[in-house]
Image: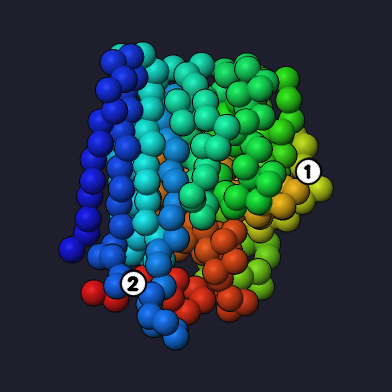
Amino acid sequence: MKRFLLIFPALAALATTVLLFAAEPPPPPAPAGGNVSPLKVLMVCGGCCHDYENQKRILAEGLSARANVEFTIVHEEGPEGKKDKTHRISIYEKEDWAKGYDLVLHNECFGAVEDVAFVERIAKPHKEGVPAVVLHCSAHSYRAAKTDEWRKVVGQKSMSHEKNRDLLVKNTAPEHPVMKGFPKEWLNPKDELYKNEELYPGFVPLAKAYGEDTKKEHHVIWVNTYEKGKVFGTTLGHNNSTMESPEYLDLVARGLLWACGKLDDSGKPVAGYGPVQK
């Protein structure tokens, strides 16, 4: 059995969903070893250009089947449910918005937000040590703001992408725990190649794909260290078909566990953090 709790906050101007999703909850941790509590993951999604209504479920179901995680999902669009690039996710208005979570999974697309203080408030918990997973358009979010703090969370500056096409993804770090089990080469149908414009000091590339426009390779999977925070990122994932693929879900699950310090050197979850046995 899987457990759902849907809550619709009374925000008339917003299309907002908060969802708790987890595999069958394990019993309380035993005093010596035994089962452990699931990682509490906040997934933030919504915005321009993507099917977030289905992607949030694809990710929650797929990752819960691969790791001992429990999701709280905040999904917002703009006024009247419109996909507004300038919308400010309401949870980010609080200074302690990430309190109580073991990791934040960002799958949002709000590229036209310009408020520097707002964007730096999003970055702050990660700077202070809250791990993150950054997927696809999250790497382009908040790019209109005149601050580099969100880009430092991501690990790179990217302001544009190439057209939607098949991407041949090459594993450039097969010995890294996150990339254990990922194919040497993976043909990812119909995705977008984000252009790397600047890489920040904590950026560690893990996979690349060739840019037809730029005639050079671009990093599409990586890990990053931002002050005290560990971050897994990939610009892949425009279409639902990519996110539904076992290769993608396996990769993101390993990245999530790595960011939380729950992935061993062989690319396997540490004891208690693999999928919950029913």
Kind of residue at disc 1:
Tyr
Does any portion of residue 86 appear in the rendered image? yes
Structural crowding at the residue carrying mark 1, measured as other residues with C-alpha within 10 Å and reported as few (<14), some (14–19) or many (≥20): some
Relative horizontal placement of residue 50, taking residue 221 as reference (left or right): left
For the image, the number of numbered tags is 2
* Mark 2 or 1, nearer chain start: 2
Report the residue at 62% width, 31% height from top. Answer: 121
Locate residue 240: give its quadrant: top left
Q: Residue at x 23, y 46 (%)?
A: 5
| Identity of the residue drawn at 43% across and 76% down | 272
Residue closest to the eye, 172 or 225: 225
Nearer to the camera, 209 or 159: 159
In this view, the residue farthest toward the left is 1
Residue highlighted by disc 1: 200
Place residue 175 in its image quadrant.
Answer: bottom right
**Residue at label 2?**
28
Q: Amino acid at mark 2?
A: Pro
Q: Quick check: 177 above or below 96? A: below
Q: Nearer the viewer, mark 2 or mark 1?
A: 2
User: Decide: marks 2, 1 in contact (CB < 8 A)?
Assistant: no
- Crowding at label 2, few (<14), some or many (≥20) Cα neighbours within 10 Å? few
Nearest the viewer among 217 and 39 is: 39
Residue 185 vs 35, above or below: the answer is above
Q: Is residue 45 left or right of residue 229?
A: left
Q: How is the image coloured?
A: rainbow
Residue 31 image position (x, y, % from top left) = 42, 82
Q: Judge whether residue 208 can be spotted in this image.
A: no
User: Could you tell me which residue is drawn at 52 percent across and 30 percent down?
Assistant: 94
